[in-house]
């Protein structure tokens, strides 16, 4: 079964069960500063799981592009990816555990759908803890489906519990479905969770049945929700009997492109499968270029930079370039890479343009940014190599032939020169790098970065904090004020909100003047002082646009959307398609003040503002 077939079957199955297909959202979450990327299929639906009413109803299904970078150093093994696709279905106060489990079982085992033999399935459930009982309801539902007790594992909170998204709010146990990939059990009671590596998780049903209070008490929810997720790449691997996600049809054309572009191919007596070290580099390049192409091809795309999502993107691209050098060496004189990644990205765009047409629309931007970043990185490497050459005479005087890890970290921190390349250069001169010293310096650097990012990325709409909701509403006022001041060409390119400030990116070719900034401030404050009511209606996306509501260019919308209006006819100030939440009237916002206006990327400006 191909990825396209799995994606289609999943949607078809859940639509047949009364679910409405909704659009997947951007990889760069709007107004949620707690994460840099959409990390799971449920992420864009958090407001609806928290109680907002979804315009499409109570049963939903979709596929969602996701990025997770927590395991970036594990990419290159058979299963880890930074970009992946998640299939998901939701019940917002409709069916609960038994209904979700029945549907999960039918889709997995019915010959009409995936046709997985029942004996290949294993299940995990929440074992319970003080104050929260064991999830026997899920156990009974699975037994009704024919899953025997010896295929059910009871696991603790760290394995089978979700949430809450903030410090308080909806949360609950989950049940996870595993596929047995071994031949013989490791022991008589081998089951999911035993750690033997013979079980691969393919699906997860989360049951939001509790509300965690600020006192830490778990109260049963009146409106219980279900959130489920199935990873496309991992499931395709299992269904096709493969031992690695990289050995599926998903990665075959990407890997062939890497072989052809690098010269690591059959024509040179090599190719994927002939050298494990080079094969690992191929897998890292395949994953990282795919991730970079999707980030750059997103309607809210960021460019490579030294902060936030742009920094992650830069790291992915440069890591791919670095592994490309390893493949190229031996096929040209110096392993020089110029525009190595963009031909691979073109293959990825062609492969995924069906389910993700935004990739085709943004093809030129994807390849252009990859080319520019490669060129910048080559300059960085040349600078680092020159600095190493300056250090070399002193290093060679050390009879131990060991380069200080602190010096290696300085090359990394000051010039962006990767430790692996420092080790490579040192090795060419018979030296080793003190990796222990480097790791210690790097760890201190990471801790500092984390503490700083912890200050930046706190609050947000995940817990619907009062100030975050106020800033979200102020963003609508700012958007309209910019259009009124600078022109209707203004279009939102990104938004990031904390409980302390808002940040808003928009298309505009030149810096704003002091007079323009003052005018925008005055307009927003005038609308706050008028104490406009804030209301919403649910309507079709066509009716929303016809009514004059602002909708993001390139954004995928459901057939029915929420339109938030600030003001009452005939004094409507703003109408915008948005999921919410917002304040009820503008008078509560306080004084709006623009702190900074600057460039974000080519043709995009950024405003940072606060409410006082």
Image (tube, helix red, strand yellow):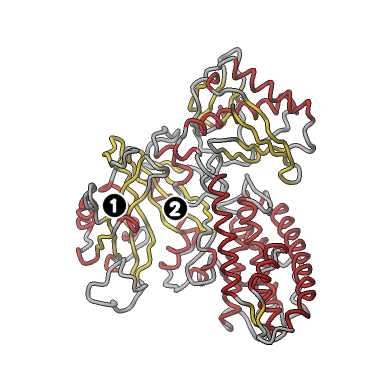
The quadrant holding residue 513 is top right
Q: Position of residue 536 (x, y in %)?
A: 50, 24
Q: In the rendered image, is residue 231 in sight?
A: yes
Q: Position of residue 495 (x, y in %)?
A: 61, 39
Q: Is residue 612 left or right of residue 318?
A: left
Of residues 131 and 85, the one drawn nearer to the viewer in this rendering: 131
- The residue singled out by tag 2 in the image is 87
Image quarter hosting the N terminus: bottom left
Q: Secondary structure at mark 1?
A: helix
Q: Which mark is residue 424?
A: none
- The residue singled out by tag 1 in the image is 101
The residue under the point 30% across, 65% down is 121
First reached walking from the N terminus: tag 1 or tag 2: 2
* Residue 549 against residue 425 in the figure, above or below: above
* Residue 484 against residue 325 in the figure, above or below: above
- Number of numbered markers: 2
Of residues 194 and 564, the one drawn nearer to the viewer in this rendering: 194
Q: How dense is the environment of label 2, judged by Cα within 10 Å: few (below 14), some, or many (20 and up)?
A: many
Q: Position of residue 524 (x, y in %)?
A: 65, 23
Q: CA distance from mark 1 to mark 2?
A: 16 Å
Of residues 134 and 521, the one drawn nearer to the viewer in this rendering: 521
Q: Are marks 1 and 2 in contact (CB under 8 Å)?
A: no
Of residues 126 and 117, the one drawn nearer to the viewer in this rendering: 126
Q: In the rendered image, is residue 257 in sight?
A: no
Q: Position of residue 612 (x, y in %)?
A: 59, 26
The residue under the point 54% across, 71% down is 76
Q: How dense is the environment of label 1, judged by Cα within 10 Å: few (below 14), some, or many (20 and up)?
A: some
The residue under the point 44% across, 47% down is 42
Q: Is residue 213 left or right of residue 505?
A: left
Q: Secondary structure at mark 2?
A: strand
* Residue 575 against residue 51 in the figure, above or below: above
């Amino acid at each position: 079964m191909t990825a396209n077939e799995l994606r289609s079957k999943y949607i078809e199955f859940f639509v047949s069960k009364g679910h409405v297909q909704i659009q997947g959202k951007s990889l760069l979450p709007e107004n949620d500063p707690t994460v840099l990327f959409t990390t799971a299929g449920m992420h864009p639906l958090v407001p609806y799981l928290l109680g907002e009413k979804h315009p499409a109803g109570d049963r939903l299904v979709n596929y969602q592009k996701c990025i997770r970078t927590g395991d970036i150093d594990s990419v290159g093994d058979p299963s880890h990816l930074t970009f992946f696709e998640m299939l998901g279905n939701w019940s917002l106060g409709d069916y609960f555990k038994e209904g979700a489990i029945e549907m999960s079982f039918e889709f997995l085992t019915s010959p009409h759908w995936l046709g997985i033999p029942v004996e290949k399935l294993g299940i995990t459930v929440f074992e319970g803890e003080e104050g929260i009982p064991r999830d026997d309801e899920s156990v009974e539902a699975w037994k009704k489906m024919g899953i025997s007790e010896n295929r059910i594992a009871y696991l603790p909170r760290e394995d089978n519990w979700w949430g809450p998204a903030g410090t308080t709010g909806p949360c609950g146990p989950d049940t996870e479905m595993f596929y047995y990939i071994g031949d013989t059990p490791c022991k008589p009671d081998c089951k999911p969770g035993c750690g033997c590596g013979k079980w691969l998780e393919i699906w997860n049903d989360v049951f939001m049945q509790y509300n965690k209070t600020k006192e830490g008490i778990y109260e049963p929810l009146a409106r219980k929700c279900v959130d489920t997720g199935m990873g496309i790449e991992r499931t395709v691997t299992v269904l096709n009997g493969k031992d690695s996600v990289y050995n599926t049809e998903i990665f075959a054309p990407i890997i062939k492109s890497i072989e052809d572009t690098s010269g690591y191919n059959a024509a040179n007596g090599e190719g994927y499968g002939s050298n494990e070290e080079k094969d690992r580099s191929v897998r890292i390049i395949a994953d990282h270029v795919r991730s970079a192409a999707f980030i750059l091809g997103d309607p809210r795309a960021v460019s490579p930079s030294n902060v936030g999502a742009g920094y992650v993107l830069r790291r992915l691209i440069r890591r791919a370039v670095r592994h490309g050098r390893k493949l190229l060496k031996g096929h040209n004189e110096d392993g020089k890479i110029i525009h190595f990644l963009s031909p691979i990205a073109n293959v990825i765009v062609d492969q995924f343009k069906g389910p993700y047409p935004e990739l085709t629309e943004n093809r030129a931007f994807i390849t252009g940014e990859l080319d520019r970043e490669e060129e910048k990185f080559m300059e960085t490497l040349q600078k680092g190599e020159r600095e190493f050459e300056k250090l070399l005479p002193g290093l060679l005087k050390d009879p131990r032939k060991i380069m200080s890890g602190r010096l290696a970290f300085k090359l990394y921190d000051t010039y962006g020169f990767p430790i692996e390349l420092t080790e490579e250069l040192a090795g060419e001169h018979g030296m080793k790098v003190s990796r222990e010293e480097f790791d210690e310096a790097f760890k201190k650097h990471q801790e500092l970065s984390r503490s700083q990012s912890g200050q930046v990325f706190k609050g947000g709409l995940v817990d619907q904090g009062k100030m975050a909701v106020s800033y979200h509403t102020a963003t609508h006022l700012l958007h309209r004020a910019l259009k009124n001041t600078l022109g209707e060409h203004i279009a939102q390119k990104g938004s990031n909100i904390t409980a302390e400030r808002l940040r808003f990116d928009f298309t505009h070719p030149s810096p704003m003047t002091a007079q323009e900034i003052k005018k925008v401030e005055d307009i927003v404050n005038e609308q706050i002082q008028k104490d406009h009511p804030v209301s919403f209606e649910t309507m079709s996306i066509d009716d929303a646009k016809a009514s004059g509501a602002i909708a993001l260019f390139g954004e995928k919308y459901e057939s029915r959307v929420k339109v938030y209006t600030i003001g009452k006819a005939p004094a409507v100030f703003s109408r915008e398609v948005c999921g919410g939440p917002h304040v009820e009237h503008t008078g509560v916002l306080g004084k709006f003040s623009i702190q900074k206006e600057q460039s974000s990327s080519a043709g995009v400006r950024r405003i940072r503002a606060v409410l006082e």
